[in-house]
Image (cartoon, rainbow, N blue to C red):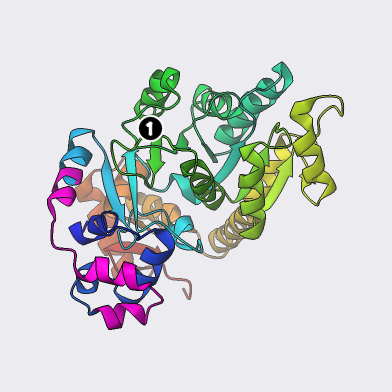
């Protein structure tokens, strides 16, 4: 993590859109701080922004931010960091830095955003909980905003089913908001999930930070589900942003005489898919993934029929490699063989031309055999 990415957050007038312009031209953020005002103006920055960036010399705020990040158990991931969520890179204005507490890892590769009102009905709470649980059981990460009502219940449902969840917050990750969710946020992290946001440590909740947070919520999910929402609910902003990003939006139909249903019913009228069964969203998120997996399984079955595995340890290793490459450590775990046995079997298979070594010391079966 380059401190110069953090420094962008400290330059007056530089927001996510401006930072995106800067990093598109200067992926190594340090170079931007050495650029001339004229060069920075060519990127589309205003005169005030360019002068502020070119004249930035006091790094003490950056040092304090680094200390706060470390003290609060967070990590700062720059746009160029391998752990930076890939889904956020595709946003029109991706944050130059996101702050994470917990394990973000690959959780957001298969994720659905679940949002809704802070004042739900008992029915809405039940749907949100069941939805979070169903997503978890299907290997899908539930992403929500950590707010009262629907958000919190979706997080709880995901964890109750043994899955992980990610809360995207509209304040610094060390500033619990709402305050009664301190325990919920701690549990999310303890259960293997994560808290994520773009605001530095110590940043209090502000009215304008939540619509900005919603674009991250929409961006992380392959689909967006609105459980209940009134006419002015922030969940509708998330849904609109998801639509603009080309994501599928599903809405839970509600009673026409309930205020909490007006927003979702209008979403359906305006083109959102009605969520008629909990599994609708699972199929929406996993559709292509399941088709790909089915094709891979069929190919693996055909290969096993055409070329049976060799005897002994080599056969166990070869069978595990059919359909999916792996490294020696993974093979040891999957087969129960020792490291020495795995390496000997791999050598035997490699000499026989039945497996090949890939970059990163991984192995795959030889398709042509």
**Considering depth in this image, is 147 or 311 the residue closer to the camera?**
147
Judge whether residue 4 can be spotted in this image. yes
**Considering depth in this image, is 18 or 221 the residue closer to the camera?**
18
**Considering depth in this image, is 23 or 288 the residue closer to the camera?**
23
Q: Where is residue 304? Give x, y as percent.
A: 54, 59
Residue shown at 61%/39% (left/top)? 234
- SS of the residue under disc 1: loop
State whether residue 24 is above or below residue 274. below
Q: Image quadrant of residue 133?
A: top right
Residue shown at 42%/57% (left/top)? 321
Q: Residue furthest front?
A: 48
- The verdict on residue 229 being magenta is no
Judge whether residue 290 can be spotted in this image. no
Q: Image quadrant of residue 291?
A: bottom right
Which quadrant, please, contains the N terminus?
bottom left
In the image: residue 180, left or right of residue 304: left
State whether residue 142 is above or below residue 241. above
**Considering depth in this image, is 134 or 246 the residue closer to the camera?**
246
Q: Image quadrant of residue 305?
A: bottom right
Q: Where is residue 251? Give x, y as percent.
A: 74, 40
Residue shown at 23%/35% (left/top)? 73
In the image: residue 30, left or right of residue 229: left
Query: What is the number of callouts on the image?
Result: 1
In magenta, the rendered stretch is: 37-65
Predominant SS of the magenta segment: helix
- The verdict on residue 56 being magenta is yes
Q: Where is residue 274? Give x, y as percent.
A: 80, 42
Residue that label 1 marks: 192
Q: Where is residue 191? Give x, y as percent.
A: 39, 27
How many residues crowd mark 1 within 10 Å: few (<14), some (14–19), many (20+)?
A: some
């Amino acid at each position: 993590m380059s401190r110069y990415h953090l420094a962008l957050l400290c330059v007056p007038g530089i927001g996510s859109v401006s930072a995106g312009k800067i990093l598109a031209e200067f992926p190594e953020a340090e170079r931007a701080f050495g650029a001339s005002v004229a060069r920075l103006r060519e990127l589309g920055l205003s005169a005030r922004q360019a002068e502020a960036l070119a004249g930035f010399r006091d790094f003490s705020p950056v040092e304090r931010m680094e200390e706060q990040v470390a003290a609060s158990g967070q990590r700062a991931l720059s746009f160029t960091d391998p752990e930076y969520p890939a889904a956020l890179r595709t946003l029109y204005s991706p944050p130059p830095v996101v702050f994470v507490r917990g394990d973000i890892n690959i959780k957001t590769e298969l994720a659905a955003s679940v949002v809704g009102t802070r004042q739900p009905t008992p029915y809405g709470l039940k749907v949100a909980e069941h939805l979070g649980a169903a997503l978890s059981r299907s290997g899908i990460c539930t992403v929500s905003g950590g707010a009262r009502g629907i958000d919190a219940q979706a997080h709880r449902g995901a964890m109750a089913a043994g899955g992980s969840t990610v809360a995207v917050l509209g304040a610094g990750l060390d500033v619990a908001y709402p305050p009664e969710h301190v325990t919920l946020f701690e549990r999310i992290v303890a259960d293997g999930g994560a808290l994520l946001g773009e605001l530095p440590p110590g940043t209090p909740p502000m009215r304008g930070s939540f619509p900005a947070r919603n674009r991250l919520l929409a961006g992380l999910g392959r689909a967006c589900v609105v459980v209940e929402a009134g006419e002015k609910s922030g969940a509708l902003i998330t849904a609109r942003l998801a639509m603009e990003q080309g994501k599928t939006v599903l809405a839970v139909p509600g009673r026409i005489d309930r205020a909490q249903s007006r927003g979702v019913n209008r979403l359906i009228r305006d083109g959102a898919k009605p969520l008629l069964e909990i599994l609708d969203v699972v199929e929406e998120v996993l559709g292509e993934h399941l088709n790909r997996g089915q094709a891979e399984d069929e190919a693996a079955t055909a290969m096993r029929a055409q070329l049976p595995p060799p005897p002994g340890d080599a056969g166990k290793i070869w069978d595990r490699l059919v359909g999916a490459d792996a490294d020696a450590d993974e093979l040891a775990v999957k087969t129960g063989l020792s490291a020495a046995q795995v390496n000997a079997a791999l050598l035997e298979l490699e000499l026989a031309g039945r497996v090949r070594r890939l970059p990163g010391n991984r192995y795959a079966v030889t398709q042509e055999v």
